[in-house]
Image: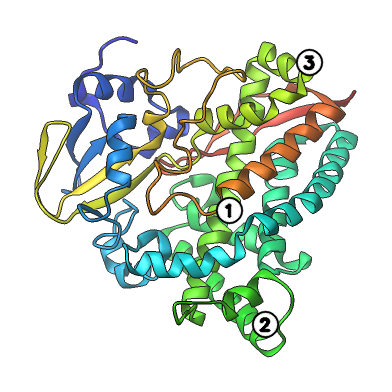
Amino acid sequence: MENVDLASVNLFDSDVYAERVPHEWFAELRRSAPVWRQELPDGRVFWNVTRHEDLTAVNRDASNYSSWLASSLTMPGMEDILDQQRLMMVNMDPPEHTKLRKVVNKGFTPAMIRQLQEHLAEEARTIVAEAVETGDVEFVEQVACELPLIAIAEFLGVPREDRRRIFDLSNRMVGAEDPDYQVDEEEAMAAMIEMYAYAQELADERKANPRDDIVSKLLSAEVDGEHLTVEEFNVFFLLLAVAGNETTRNAISHGMLALLENPDQQQKLRDDPSLIDGAIEEILRWGSPVMHFRRQTTRDVTLAGVDIPDNSGVVFWHISANRDETVFEDPYTFNVERDASQHIAFGGGGPHFCLGANLARAEMKVVFTELLRQATWEQRAPARRLRSNFINGIKDLQVTLTPK
């Protein structure tokens, strides 16, 4: 890649991401300024971390890099709702984060995931069969979003008739920057409040009538004398509904696009289905559905030889670290035979490693297994990207599915 003038770079310009991920910017930053200070037009300052090694160091060091001080998000106006954001596990530090995660882990046991995976495989067969019967599909809405919605709904006990409502609310919350969704910040906040209210109704119902499901288990779980309060459950519901829906949907969409654009890799999967687990890891590396998270320094720190002052915003970029040339050979090539196990699509380890990582992998595996088994594919139009520098989103992917 050609050298880039860093004076022209604005990593927070969402218009750029509506067209493409600016990989040339990240490549230059990894090469010449791996910890790079950027002052935004609104006066906010962020120190951007772009290398795999440095991202992992920040993500594992909650004592120096806090999620609680300023939240893990970079959107303007976060300070106005910081108290509310701090109720969310992704915005907590140990020991509060550790206590809450222990409780929530009760719902994410390997046995629960295995039990759900069998059901998800049946759902995936049906989703793909219906799409193949239709033929010309908008892949994101008709295939990619369906299984994550079902999984989260099953996980949280959301009735089938309410799944679309959860889908629409999460779209409104993460799509506030995209003109296609026609949502302003006030409407995004209203969607958040409506999601809280829905979670409250669900919690009230389960407290009155407990069932053998995740919601009842979470509300009754106790770890070291700690219970999940209803308010904590409401926030966790929102986090899981949005994170579990948006991220896995986009991972599936990026996987389909990558296989469409790399037919040789698609053929390798068709010829050798045993490659599917490694291919899922490569799709996650390639797509990196969450492009960045933010931390706030708790003291003066030095990272990669760069001094960062106390109380500074530090943003680490998964989308860059997953193309780090020192970790991944030929990183701009999609390769289903690659050992991509060091990808950090789920975070670089540490206390905030993605709680739903194995659930996401399970969903992706059953969807692509069925797509490969049931159909051949052809792309009908260029993919359209979400206008966001946070979610690496595909909002429209026109595909023709033909029965094998």
Q: How crowded is mark 1: few (under 14 residues within 10 Å), some or many (20 or more)?
A: many
Q: Is mark 2 on a helix, strand or loop?
A: helix
Residue 195 placement: quadrant: bottom right
Residue topped by disc 1: 244
Q: Residues within 10 Å of mark 2 (few under 14, many from 20)?
A: some
Q: Is residue 11 above or below residue 169?
A: above
The spot of residue 302 in percent (x, y) is 12, 40
Instruction: Specify the amino acid type for callout 2.
Output: Arg
The spot of residue 338 in percent (x, y) is 56, 19
Residue at point 49% right, 35% down? 288
Mark with earlier residue (2, 1): 2
Residue 3 placement: quadrant: top left
Q: How are the colours assigned in the image?
A: rainbow
Residue 380 in view (yes/no): no
Residue at point 67% right, 29% down? 256
Between marks 1 and 3 in the image, the one whose residue lies nearer the viewer: 3
